[in-house]
Amino acid sequence: MQASHIRKGAEKDLPQVHKLIYELAVFERAPEEMTLTLEQLQLDFAAESPAFHFFVAENDGKITGMALYFFTYSTWKGKTLYLEDLVVQENWRCKGIGSLLFEAVLNEAHRTGARRMAWQVLEWNNPAIEFYKKYKAELDAEWINGRLREQQISQLATH
């Protein structure tokens, strides 16, 4: 096995990234919730202002993990890098790939002048919680996540 190589993701990587996203949905026990198509992922990445950026991990010439992120803005802190998902293929876990991907995103936050880096982790995902604790991350149980789904947005929007 060769050492993991981390690099910025490119359009050609999106089919494999889409598969990793589905693998994550299965791991999180909600594959039916993933409605994102490869075509939509490609459109959102190719936009004049891409909706997201990502890093990939390569091992033996194959993508074995990815970290997808985007920028948002905090009215209290300023520019924020939001790590949407970090996923490593099951058979490649516990080999340091997650750390390499997380550190690539962390370095990107620093390089781009982000004042904060944020993400979510499911309360039952103990391996991920322990992973983030190694970085001395603040894991805040105080905040409640709010969300409107596509159908709700359509119903509530004033046209």
Image (cartoon, rainbow, N blue to C red):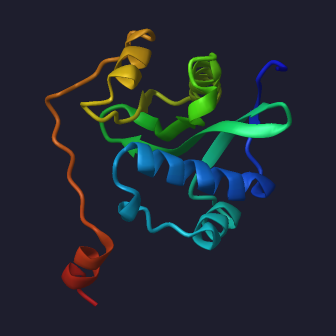
Q: Is residue 6 left or right of residue 19?
A: right
Viewer-nearest residue: 149 or 91:
91
Q: Is residue 58 above or below residue 134?
A: below
Marker count (numbered): 0
Q: Is residue 96 left or right of residue 132?
A: right
Where residue 96 sits, quadrant-wise, is top right
Where residue 121 sits, quadrant-wise, is top left
Viewer-nearest residue: 143 or 49:
143
Q: Is residue 117 above or below residue 99?
A: below
Q: Which residue is found at the position 69% from the left and 36% from the top?
A: 64
State which quarter of the image contains the N terminus: top right
State which quarter of the image contains the C terminus: bottom left
Where residue 138 sits, quadrant-wise, is top left
Q: Position of residue 50 (x, y in %)?
A: 63, 58
Q: Position of residue 130 (x, y in %)?
A: 37, 15
Q: Which residue is found at the position 58% from the left and 71% from the top?
A: 40
Viewer-nearest residue: 17 or 112:
17
Q: Which residue is found at the position 28% from the left and 22% from the top?
A: 139
Q: Is residue 116 left or right of residue 70?
A: left
Q: Is residue 56 above or below residue 110?
A: below
Q: Position of residue 136 (x, y in %)?
A: 39, 9
Q: Position of residue 144 (x, y in %)?
A: 16, 41
Q: Which residue is found at the position 44% from the left and 17% from the top?
A: 131
Q: Residue furthest bottom?
A: 159
